[in-house]
Amino acid sequence: MNFKKISRIALFTALAAMPIMAQDAESGAHLKVSLDTVWTLIAAFLVFFMQAGFAMVESGFTRAKNASNIMMKNLMDFSFGSIAFWVVGFGLMFGTSLGGFIGSDSFFLIDGIPGTNDWPFAFFLFQTVFAATAATIVSGAMAERTKFVSYLVYSVIISAVIYPIFGHWAWGSLFGKGKGWLEALGFIDFAGSTVVHSIGGWAALAGAIVLGPRIGKYTADGRAKAIPGHNLPIAALGVFILWFGWFGFNPGSTTAGTNLSIGRIAVTTNMAAAAGAVTAMFFSWMILKKPDPSMALNGVLAGLVAITAPCAAVSPMSAVIIGGIAGILVVASVLFIDKVLKVDDPVGAVSVHGVCGAFGTISAGLFAEASYSGGVNGLLFGGGFNQLGVQLAGAGSAFAWSFGLCLLLFFIIKSTIGLRVKPEEEIQGLDIGEHGLEAYNGFQIFTTEN
Amino acid sequence: MNFKKISRIALFTALAAMPIMAQDAESGAHLKVSLDTVWTLIAAFLVFFMQAGFAMVESGFTRAKNASNIMMKNLMDFSFGSIAFWVVGFGLMFGTSLGGFIGSDSFFLIDGIPGTNDWPFAFFLFQTVFAATAATIVSGAMAERTKFVSYLVYSVIISAVIYPIFGHWAWGSLFGKGKGWLEALGFIDFAGSTVVHSIGGWAALAGAIVLGPRIGKYTADGRAKAIPGHNLPIAALGVFILWFGWFGFNPGSTTAGTNLSIGRIAVTTNMAAAAGAVTAMFFSWMILKKPDPSMALNGVLAGLVAITAPCAAVSPMSAVIIGGIAGILVVASVLFIDKVLKVDDPVGAVSVHGVCGAFGTISAGLFAEASYSGGVNGLLFGGGFNQLGVQLAGAGSAFAWSFGLCLLLFFIIKSTIGLRVKPEEEIQGLDIGEHGLEAYNGFQIFTTEN
Amino acid sequence: MNFKKISRIALFTALAAMPIMAQDAESGAHLKVSLDTVWTLIAAFLVFFMQAGFAMVESGFTRAKNASNIMMKNLMDFSFGSIAFWVVGFGLMFGTSLGGFIGSDSFFLIDGIPGTNDWPFAFFLFQTVFAATAATIVSGAMAERTKFVSYLVYSVIISAVIYPIFGHWAWGSLFGKGKGWLEALGFIDFAGSTVVHSIGGWAALAGAIVLGPRIGKYTADGRAKAIPGHNLPIAALGVFILWFGWFGFNPGSTTAGTNLSIGRIAVTTNMAAAAGAVTAMFFSWMILKKPDPSMALNGVLAGLVAITAPCAAVSPMSAVIIGGIAGILVVASVLFIDKVLKVDDPVGAVSVHGVCGAFGTISAGLFAEASYSGGVNGLLFGGGFNQLGVQLAGAGSAFAWSFGLCLLLFFIIKSTIGLRVKPEEEIQGLDIGEHGLEAYNGFQIFTTEN
């Protein structure tokens, strides 16, 4: 093996890193790129940590007998995803654009990386942790019954191909190598309500449909039964971790600490999350007669997902309204999908990420204000239907792309390597069946059909 | 609804954010405000994450049957608190001062916000997460028996009114709109031993008294019985999270990354926490014959709470002494409150936050050194009794304000909507009674009276 | 007690902090030191948080009956370690060098601290959290049978003496007070594969040997029995926390945010961790017939430990290779130590930190590239055997120093205060025996011999 060649693969880094070294480290230019790099990295670290949050939420809301499997899935989708995104995803997303549809270079971080400093690496890491987020969303909706090997296959495909190509449409220009068709239309999705969350959420919907419900989820006459999660404290911890990480996700999407909208973005993010928790709690209290913790927790996530697109374009007041609507929407959607559509989504991933992601994207067309958004007003601020139309186009194309492609993907997997574990294994739990151990060794746990 | 009007509500943000955009992003002025904003935001994120720490500590130290209720309370006090502080609290605390007693504008983040950049938003977020901390402290002392709806009511009142008004007295000038009466006296409370922790701790004491002890806590002849917590690992995780978050709480209280005391403040914070753990462990070992994990964990928190006021005014050596005393004090106080006062505080919140908060505040009058504190020496460094007197006045007024007002508040709640769940519900657990679910579904758990 | 004297003990801080105050806060020099301080502090906070990760991993991989003891150990080694490192460790490591072998001043942070700003405090905190990491590694290998008081003794000695002296050899010059002998040779250990991890790992090996295996670990005929951990979700959470914290550990080791290699270091760190997870999973799948979560989790840590030395000197591609090899190595090593050497290391600490630390250190001699490393090429990039020889010398001397000294230390402890709890206590669990409580009160847990 020629290691000299491998060296060249990352050659740009040397070219990129060196010139700045010679500069005065106290110059304004050096300090600016340093601060932008520091900010982008810290934001990336926070978004990375969201993987722990997803793992905790997903396992907390499902049964003890599958907890190890869920940890394994979350760990491995990030690990495979990091490598796949480096090999191919980043290039498809941010490489030189072919007609606004797909990137065509920068694979393995080689060739044509713009800039003469280290910020591109920080940007790359930030994008890597985003890609892994899209993939991990899917695992929640398909929890407790999916074959582990099939999970690995589709999660890699999502991180490496499905997510990055759509990402190119909306964000391709961020690396300076040509514009995606959606952003050319003026699509607003600041931090990824659509690009990350809806793409993940609609993939999750496709997966849950193809997979079918868990054994015991629906009675013979079609009535939905609740299958309670096994560990509410870790689910809540997971939501706190996600909220914490979202402060990297949204404000970090400036990828620049010298962009002075970061303070306002952090505030809109927090207000929407808080409002989502409040409305989801009250709405669940009204409908279910008690303030339901799992609904309140999902309300937080709903608010966060919804504000992700418009976070930089709206006022704190609008953020409260957007988050508040999302909190109600997520409760209604969870109940609708569970009881009317009869699609079994154990953690509510489709409602949180798909539905609220679409709503948040559309909300940017309603609530955007020129003073924040760089000139665009939404419908409610006198901007007419223009931006709203673009937002609908973006949300709609995400649904078509992700749901359509993933439906196909899951059918192919189902009819080749298989998508679902055997019924005996599902009843016994995937921890033993797929991984040969128990999550809570020594504890007395009742493992019934559900 | 007139959305144009809502827009105006946050108009200042546009006015604030725009001018700087035109500036050279590589200028010293722009870089300074950027770095200050980045630092303040990251500190705010860390303090936000303390909510997860409080949730874990409180649930870990109490029983499994109430764990969901505790998650819900911690989630909702932050969510309601964020909104209440935005609506009214921030204005009462930092608005134009009426005679040093109360702020009078800046509600909903409108009008008269000084500055022409984005740092005010970062400052607002930092203050929001502080307000929520004060409120969440109370929940620990009142755990396992408080009605959920009553909890919501009083936690909003604390975040929105009780905390901010006292905060105005001590910190009102931080936003440049007039000075509080305590700070006019020269009161030192850098990061809130009194403002945040004692206010929370004395409110907690009032709550625990009005509420009365948990069923089974005291025998017929008045002997205190231990009611062990259900999950020490998550309690310990919570303490680690709180320690981690405190690095935002204390050094972040410069609200400026260009303030070069942040390094020293981080060191004094860490030393005091470490010393508190060590002395609490040894003291519990002496008294209880074994090194008690819950005492050692509370020792960390005691050290952190105590150093919060003097963190910027003392040397690392003094920090070790302050933290070490706090570690002993918290053990003594927990035992005294439990066995002598017979007030049932399930997690030791009154001792940690009230008692050690007051001690830490007073310690600034003993250990302050002019070279750190900007000119003030404490009693032990030749400053005489002057500063000590001011510190005692601050600590005393916090007790009078918070304990007095909260006693009234809890009596009003008790005699209207009621403060306590029914005995049957308390025995069965609040998770089922208040929220209709169990925290650990599928696990065999023994739910006895305690 | 003369408090004036105590004041002088930290006098340098006043000298250090004051001059910069007078400077223009918007100057390039002030902004540079501010950004470096902010970065170093945030990195230190992240590394601090790794303590929570270690606590979760270690307790998750062991039995419920010892979970409180493990929390206590992790809490107290950090607390004692913080104080011991301040008293003596920092001075031995970074004080004025005596012949490259040992530092000789700067105890208690007094005298001769270079610089006129606050960065030294940030640097001190960063080094403190590193020292505590080395100590905490040991606790995993000695879990479930070590006397608590003996644990305190040896963990202080490691933080205060064994770690810092070796640290002086490799990193002594970082504080500008003379060079260690290993760094004079050109030893590359950027963030401590050897200095932190191998030192900890070989101490752990010595401890596990002297202590002997847990009761029931080996059958009468010498066959190793698996003793499964009690809580895989918290073990996984711990690994996520460690991965998160490692973004402080490695990129933070620049101790300067204006050093523009931080982006690339973060990327190499992430790639190696991901690759380690992937190869460990596949290798365990091959050997054990199922993809084993505990092996995959250890694969992450293996990749992280291995990349810690070469993270700043290699390309992302090389990082993938290094992490990938470490993932295989850790699985092989865990099985070898368990089944062939018959040393009982409950969490695999020796394999992760000792073996992969040594491998990572050596890998810098293979994969270093001049463009990243500041001029040094490894064997595979045309640099010949030179650097490789130095790396082997460093890894070898760490083994000799730490394993040798700790063997002696543990024998001394064993023959004086004793190293191991009584068999009855081991069977019942250390939580009750050492600390008088249970970790999971109210849960039905089966406490058998294993």
Image: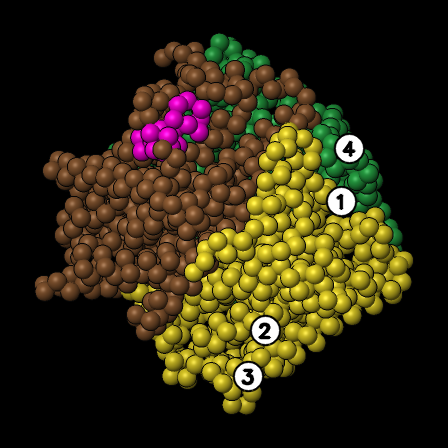
Chain colours: A green, B brown, C yellow
Relative to the observer, which residue lies in front, A266 or A149? A266
Q: Which residues are magenta?
A: B164-184
Please state, as top left, top right, bottom left or bottom right, where the N terminus of chain C lies in the image: bottom left
Q: What amino acid type should be assigned to the residue bearing mark 3?
A: Ile
> Which label was assigned to residue C412?
3
Q: What amino acid type should be assigned to the residue bearing mark 2?
A: Ala
Residue B359 in view here: yes
Q: Is residue B183 in the magenta section?
A: yes
Subunit bearing disc 3: C
Helix, strand or loop for disc 1: helix
Q: Work out whether B101 lies above or below B365.
A: above
Q: What amino acid type should be assigned to the residue bearing mark 4?
A: Pro
Q: Gap between marks 3 and 4, in whole Å?
A: 60 Å
Picture residue at 14% right of the left edge, 48% below the top: B422
Q: Residues within 10 Å of mark 4 (few under 14, many from 20)?
A: few
Mark toward the viewer: 1 or 2: 2
Picture residue at 72% right of the left edge, 63% below the top: C97
